Image (cartoon, helix red, strand yellow):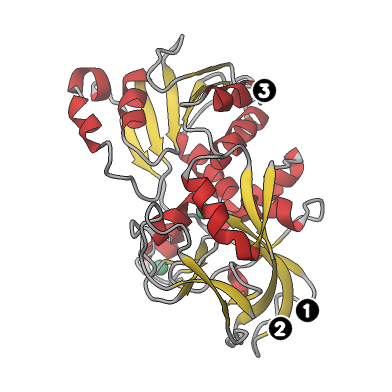
Amino acid sequence: MKAMVLDTIVNLGENPEPLRLSQLEDPSPGETEVLIRVSACGVCHTELDEIEGRTPPSHFPMILGHQVVGTIAGLGTRATRFRTGDRVGVAWIFAACGHCKFCQAGNENLCPDFRGTGRDANGGYAEYMSVREDFCYPIPEQFSDVGAAPLLCAGAIGYRSLRLSNIKPGQILGLTGFGASAHLVLKMARHRFPDIAVFVFARSEKERAFARELGAAWAGDTTENPPHRLDAIIDTTPVWRPDVEALRNLEAGGRLVINAIRKEERDKEALLSLRYADHLWLEKEIKSVANVTRRDVSEFLLLAAEMNIKPEVEEFALVDANRALVELKAAKIRGAKVLRV
Ligand SMILES: [Zn+2]
Ligand SMILES: [Zn+2]
């Protein structure tokens, strides 16, 4: 099979072609695994973190990609859940142990043996991949392969972050950063709680205009003062300044949810401007979002189908994965980037 392979950690600024097109043997599924013929794979900010070493692959070479849609092309000897030809998706959670205290409590996202698709096991930047059958999800019929791919990460993790925000009807929800995940969160939030107001903090006027188009009640720059304090803010940026500003804008008892797998170091000094009285006092909380559970993915796919979500998608060929990543890094983003395999 053809695959785009990462051989080592690379600084994308110095090397805009970190992935190498290679010809590999097709994977063969283990006993409880399925072989998937990949048709689409979303391109995620986490891939930048993997390539640049902020959340490095656990071994090399590695095939990245954790928003995979395809059809079952082979079954392990004990795999019975799907049939050949069924359409399935694979998300960031590739496997968890199933028996630790976290797995037992449904928090498999916190499992010490959590394995990320495309980081700890080969993912979807390839013609085929194999994965345990119980870590696959049927894709609702109404979605195209390319349209479903971005739902599997940005959407599912966005769903988890919205759950963790603890937002209630009638409250004000903030989103700081307005990429693929946030625009889905905005739609989900307005669907689940028609009477909440969503405020969007984003650097570019283009993003802010897009937010207003999608129904944001207010959109401004990260450093602007919104007309009201916010009950919860979800941060999807890779940097620190937006968190400092978000804490300042939180209502008493409000919660900042940081939905980022890693933070970059470049503006870390922003944290030195934290003042306890302004940013933390009055029981303001900070909570991070780690990974996803299968429940998040399954529930979100059903919600997305119910809402008839159609993510804006920009398609790239598999061999153009490097270009998609460089453009993602440059924040040339309106919708989600998807490789058509
Ligand atoms: Zn992702
Ligand atoms: Zn576990």
Judge left or right: residue 175 versus residue 257. Answer: right
Quarter that holds the C terminus:
bottom right
- Separation (CA) of disc 2 from disc 3: 44 Å
Q: Residues within 10 Å of mark 1 (few under 14, many from 20)?
A: few
N-terminal-most mark, 2 or 3: 2
Answer yes or no: do the residues labelled 1 and 2 have beta carbons within 8 Å? yes
- Separation (CA) of disc 3 from disc 1: 41 Å
Q: Which residue is mark 2?
A: 74
The answer, for residue 54, to whether it is visible in the render is: yes
Answer yes or no: do the residues labelled 2 and 3 have beta carbons within 8 Å? no
Which label was assigned to residue 213?
3
* Relative height, residue 332 to residue 301 (above, below): above
Q: Nearer the viewer, residue 146 or 232?
A: 146
Secondary structure category for the residue under label 2: strand
Q: Residues within 10 Å of mark 2 (few under 14, many from 20)?
A: some
- Separation (CA) of disc 1 from disc 2: 6 Å
Q: Position of residue 330 (x, y in %)?
A: 48, 42
N-terminal-most mark, 3 or 1: 1
Which label was assigned to residue 153?
none
Amino acid at dot 3 = Glu
Secondary structure category for the residue under label 3: helix
Q: How many marks?
A: 3
Q: Which residue is mark 1?
A: 84
Q: Residue at x 74, y 58 (%)?
A: 145
Q: Residue at x 66, y 79 (%)?
A: 35
Secondary structure category for the residue under label 1: loop
